Image (cartoon, helix red, strand yellow):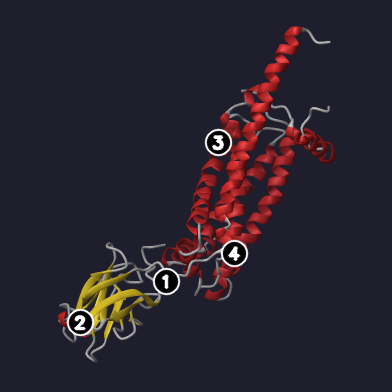
Amino acid sequence: MRSSSESGERTSDTTRRSFLKALIVFSGALVLLPLERLSAYLLERKSGTASYPRVKIVHSSEVAAGDSILFLYPSNDRSAVLIHLGSGDFVAYDAVCTHLGCQIHFDKEPIKGWENRKDNLFCACHGAVFDPNNGDVVAGPPPRPMPKIKLEIDTNGDIYANGYESGLPLYGEE
Amino acid sequence: MSNRSWLDRFWDWLVSRTKIEPFITSRVPRHALSPIYCLGGTTFLLFVVLAVTGVLLSMYYIPTPADAFDSVTAITKTVPYGWLIRSVHFYSANGMLILAVLHMLRVYYTGSYKAPRELNWVAGVGLGLLTLFAGYTGYTLRWDQVAVGASGIGKGIATSIPYLGPLFGTVLWGKGPGDTLSRYAGSHMLLIPGVMVILMAIHFWMVKRHGISGPL
């Protein structure tokens, strides 16, 4: 037989033990419950292009042949360039150089000192040159071609950007 | 006994069959009941977190120069909760380095490295160096401009070692640029964690054998 003081201790001990058990079960549930949502990591996969918005850039009459404009895509902190090629086609590219992230330009009038870079997409930081027809690297250090933006021109002549045709706007996003 | 829950009876059964009792009820001296004595264990906890998240990341990561960066971007942007897994891996890696250094300082300032525990200090230094190498190889796996530059710096340091340098350079970098990323990936995911698990087993076993060092 136990004395009353011992049995008193035992009661408080039992309470503490059941409290700790409840705590363990509760914290175990806190660990396990999110796994139901986290299982999406292995079970589901979003498509890579679905997250880019369809955005109106400009009316096609506002950009003369051989000219270009800068616009913001896919978000308001990232520049892109729309070019009206001599052939009459419109093309658009991410305007953040794939080398070290400077802004690239398509200049009708060549930049002073870089006259031989006329009619190309040009990055002034390290002299990178991209082909405006397909975004390929023509000269300089970039490791990848410029990401090409998919364009849609509706019946009114409005030009829309809708995701990427090739490449993804990676620089500054990693 | 009849009023014991099935959970209690299952627990008793588990303890009696696994003989786990001495590991979970080991007594710790009073002076060691302090957060600074938990730094090594917390470092190990982060190693476990890194192993779990690392296995998950390896499900999507592609260790080839052409695909590495794009696969890392895909993990961050398109795989559900990929950003979370990658962030936990990244911050745990940084935390593990910090905690390992703090653990080393604790062992130094409490004199726990002294006889008879010198070899455990040596094992710990080995684990610390491997943690550094794991951090370095992990950071090159993104294979962006920074990572390519970092791997070049690593090769420069390795090859500057007298006599053995060129050998190390070849081992680390392989014979051509295509080899490099595969070797970093293999080191980061298999070689380094494998050796670390062995060294940690030795480290913990020696702690058990020697017990916690005495109070200051």
Q: Quadrant of residue B102?
A: top right
Identified by mark 3, the residue type is Leu
Marks 1 and 4 share the same chain = no
Q: Which residue is denoted by mark 3 in the rendering?
A: B105
Q: Nearer the viewer, mark 3 or mark 4?
A: 4
Q: Is residue B162 visible?
A: no
The chain under label 4 reads B
Q: Which mark is residue A60?
A: 2
Residues at badges 3 and 1 in contact (C-beta under 8 Å)?
A: no
Q: Nearer the viewer, mark 2 or mark 3?
A: 2
Q: CA distance from mark 3 to mark 4?
A: 36 Å
Q: Which mark is residue B59?
A: 4
Q: Which residue is denoted by mark 1 in the rendering?
A: A49
Q: Is residue B29 above or below residue A167?
A: above
Marks 3 and 1 share the same chain = no
Per the image, label 2 sits on a secondary structure element best described as helix
- Tell me where residue B79 appears, x and y as whole percent: 50, 63
Marks 2 and 3 share the same chain = no
Identified by mark 1, the residue type is Thr
Per the image, label 1 sits on a secondary structure element best described as loop
